[in-house]
Image (cartoon, grey):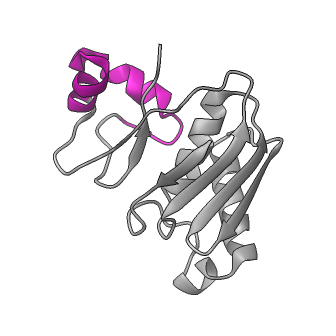
Amino acid sequence: MGLWNFVKNAGKSVFGSADAAETPDVAEAAIKKEVSDLGLDHTGIELKVEGDKVVMSGDAVSQEVKEKIILAAGNVDGIAAVEDTVSAPDAREPVFHTVEKGDTLWAISAKHLGNGAHYEKIFEANKPMLSHPDKIYPGQMLRIPQA
């Protein structure tokens, strides 16, 4: 449970227009569609948009799914934060990394996992949001898998 800050003007465009993002019903539908399109099971989780913040509540099927939904919602252009009060059966504190200019999954892996060669673990932990290990961008938040 927490408040996760994102880079507001970095991320995937899902609203279609700036005006649409200002309409909570349209914004909520776009976020829910993005989560569904990624194949993430958001059963039991309510997603609401309040300005540039997504508020998540309810019960997730797992900690992994909860973390992926936080990232799917937060890594959207126009979203600055995700507030999470979701419980999960295997709850633990998530570890995230915000990509900076020049970052690679290898460097992120070396920093967080102690060995750059474990970059595939980070790539796998961020599927389906990542489609290729080289397709990360500054401002994007990534999930760091925990043992």
Is residue 49 shown above or below 86? below
Specify whether residue 69 is painted magenta: no
Residue 110 picture location, percent across and down: 22, 23
| The quarter of the displayed image where residue 22 is located | bottom right
Q: Nearer the viewer, residue 23 or 132?
A: 23
Q: Quarter of the image containing the N terminus?
A: top right
Tally of numbered tags? 0
Residue 68 in the figure: left or right of residue 85: left
Identified at 66% across, 71% down, the residue is 50
Is residue 75 shown above or below 88? below
Residue 65 in the figure: left or right of residue 108: right
Is residue 63 shown above or below 6? above
Identified at 60% across, 77% down, the residue is 21
Residue 100 in the figure: left or right of residue 88: left
Residue 147 picture location, percent across and down: 47, 13
**Residue most toward the right?**
44
Identified at 43% across, 57% down, the residue is 6
Identified at 70% across, 27% down, the residue is 62
Residue 76 picture location, percent across and down: 50, 61
Range shown magenta: 106-132
| The quarter of the displayed image where residue 131 is located | top left
Q: Nearer the viewer, residue 83 or 76?
A: 83
Specify whether residue 126 is painted magenta: yes
| The quarter of the displayed image where residue 122 is located | top left
Residue 69 in the figure: left or right of residue 7: right
Residue 64 picture location, percent across and down: 61, 29
